Image (tube, helix red, strand yellow):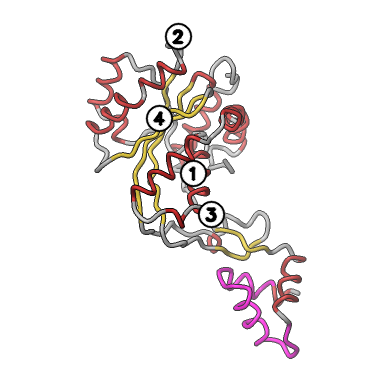
Amino acid sequence: MRKLSRCVKKHRRKSLSEITNIFNESIDRPFSKRTVERKLHSDGFHKRSVKKKIRIREVNKKKRVAYCRGNLHKTVNAHWSKVIFSDECKVIIGQDSRVSVWRKVGEEWLTDCICPPSQRKYSLMIWGCITYHGVGTITVVEGNINALKYIEIIDNNLWPVVVRHFPDDNYVFQDDNAPVHRARSVQDFRRETGLKSMNWPAQSPDLNIIENCWWVLKRELQKRTQNINNTKDLEREIRDIWDKLTVTYLKSLYNSIPRRILRVMRNKGNITKY
């Protein structure tokens, strides 16, 4: 059904009913919605949520490959299990604005199959960290994050994680290259407190396994929207979901790091499925 295939490619964001109506206008014998759906599925088309595309600069692609090459032979037990992964995340919830499109396997990054995120009703900025041994602190961040605020976040929330999970002080702290993270005052704080940090390649969310935790958090929040009527409710649900992230799940993320590194190298620094 080439005509149906052309129709759905032209109207990827339409509902099944709309696709059926549009298609039936171009043929003599109308199809039922069920028949259209069956033919679309047999041709490989399914309704899927759109992807949010990340464009990586060429210079950062090279840095990503160089970083992965330098860490290619590091094992989970000897190295990665000692890394504390961290990040900020803005959680927005309220109206359900998820967008779905008709596409085949492998078409998720086509221009007409992606879209930017939209705004919702309630939002919180949070900072969190994870370890190989369990979740670390998660905290709500009030106001904008500047260098002073970031130092306060680290000072109040990271050290308890180090004490609890790394009593021998054998840890490495990971944060990304956000300008506030690399501010001079933050670097001074690292030196003065002896914070053990690591280099990190820019534009590398696919290497930061805490991103998967944010994905789980947001997915679970969508199931609890009926419980959220204000930001206090949102914070309560965030903390509950966070505390239920299991050690088994976290270890599976850590164990995926060598595969992620290989994937980035094979993909020549471009963004990967992770």
Neighbours of disc 2 within 10 Å: few (<14), some (14-19), many (20+): few
Residue 60, quarter of the rendered image:
top left
**Real-space Cα separation, disc 2 to disc 4, in angstroms:** 19 Å
Work out whether mark 1 precedes mark 3 in sequence or the reverse, and give the earlier one: 3
> Pointer 2 and pointer 4: residues touching (CB < 8 Å)?
no
Say which residue label 2 marks: 168
Neighbours of disc 3 within 10 Å: few (<14), some (14-19), many (20+): some
> Pointer 1 and pointer 2: residues touching (CB < 8 Å)?
no
The amino acid on which the numbered mark 4 sits, given as a three-letter code, is Thr
Kindly state the secondary structure of the residue where label 3 is placed. loop
Work out whether mark 4 precedes mark 3 in sequence or the reverse, and give the earlier one: 3
**Real-space Cα separation, disc 2 to disc 3, in angstroms:** 42 Å
Between 232 and 54, the residue placed more toward the observer is 232
Foreground: disc 4 or disc 3: 4
> Pointer 2 and pointer 3: residues touching (CB < 8 Å)?
no
Say which residue label 1 marks: 217
The amino acid on which the numbered mark 1 sits, given as a three-letter code, is Leu
Q: Which residue is at 50% across, 27% downward?
A: 67
Depicted 152 relative to depicted 118: above or below: above
Work out whether mark 1 precedes mark 4 in sequence or the reverse, and give the earlier one: 4
The amino acid on which the numbered mark 2 sits, given as a three-letter code, is Asp
* Residue 95 position within the rendered picture, expressed as x and y whole percent measured from the top left: 43, 62
Depicted 48 relative to depicted 64: above or below: below
